[in-house]
Amino acid sequence: MSTQEGSGIDWKTWEPGMRATLMFIRVGDDILLIEKQRGIGAGKINGPGGKIDPGETPLQCAIRETQEELCITATGVQKMGELFFVMSDMPDIHCHVFMADGYEGTPTETPEAIPLWCKVDAIPFDRMWADDRYWLQEMLAGETFCGRFVFEEEAIRWREVKFGMNW
């Protein structure tokens, strides 16, 4: 499950149907997640994020989406990785992943998301996308990464994750 040839995808020419972002806010041993209320991933636990608007950079999108979903502004933000998803039941996604070490404001429930604080060592992977268990803990420990995943509905059919990327 780790060779590009095994994916059946030509990653050099692959184009996503959607470009998106995720933001994870880590403060000490705690991480701020969301329970997604609607849209892609509704009902799942994840970081705030969403589609990149035309003319918007991935960083601008990650900050905007966090403001819209949790009514806070992430601070100390750095890019940690990129995810490439080939999906069987929705558009393929290229996702830029960011981590912040703080925020301004008060995390607030919105129609998009319910804020959920948890300990870094108690992340509810059973309520998250299946790929998260292959990179999230390493990212929270400071590792940069690139992950490619082929999903058949909710199940991973193929995966490749590399750490130590230079963004």
Image: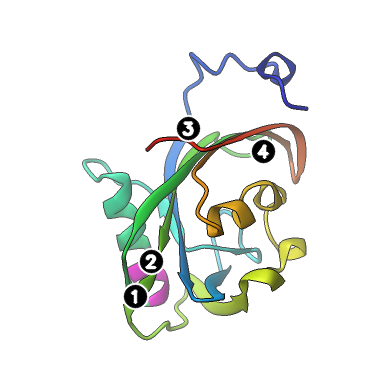
The reply to whether discs 2 and 1 touch (Cβ–Cβ < 8 Å) is yes
Whichever of callouts 4 and 2 sits on the residue coming sooner in the sequence is 2
Circle 3: residue type? Gly
Mark 3: give few (<14), some (14-19) or many (20+) Cα within 10 Å.
Answer: few
- Using the numbered discs, state the Cα–Cα distance from disc 3 to disc 2 in whole angstroms: 22 Å
Whichever of callouts 2 and 1 sits on the residue coming sooner in the sequence is 2
Viewer can see residue 105: yes
Start and end of the magenta stretch?
Answer: 66-70
Q: Nearer the viewer, mark 1 or mark 3?
A: 1
Q: Secondary structure at mark 3?
A: loop
User: In this orientation, which residue lies closer to the viewer: 103 or 58?
Assistant: 103
Q: Which residue is mark 1?
A: 103
Which mark, residue 66?
2
Q: Position of residue 148 (x, y in %)?
A: 60, 32
Whichever of callouts 4 and 3 sits on the residue coming sooner in the sequence is 3
Circle 1: residue type? Tyr
- Using the numbered discs, state the Cα–Cα distance from disc 4 to disc 3 in whole angstroms: 12 Å
Q: Main secondary structure of the magenta part?
A: helix
Q: Which residue is mark 4?
A: 89
Mark 4: give few (<14), some (14-19) or many (20+) Cα within 10 Å.
Answer: few
Q: Nearer the viewer, mark 4 or mark 2?
A: 2
Q: Nearer the viewer, mark 2 or mark 1?
A: 1
Viewer can see residue 36: no
Q: Quadrant of residue 74?
A: bottom left
Q: Is residue 111 magenta?
A: no
Circle 2: residue type? Thr
Q: Which residue is mark 3?
A: 17
**Residue at image location 38% in from the left, 66% down from the top:** 66
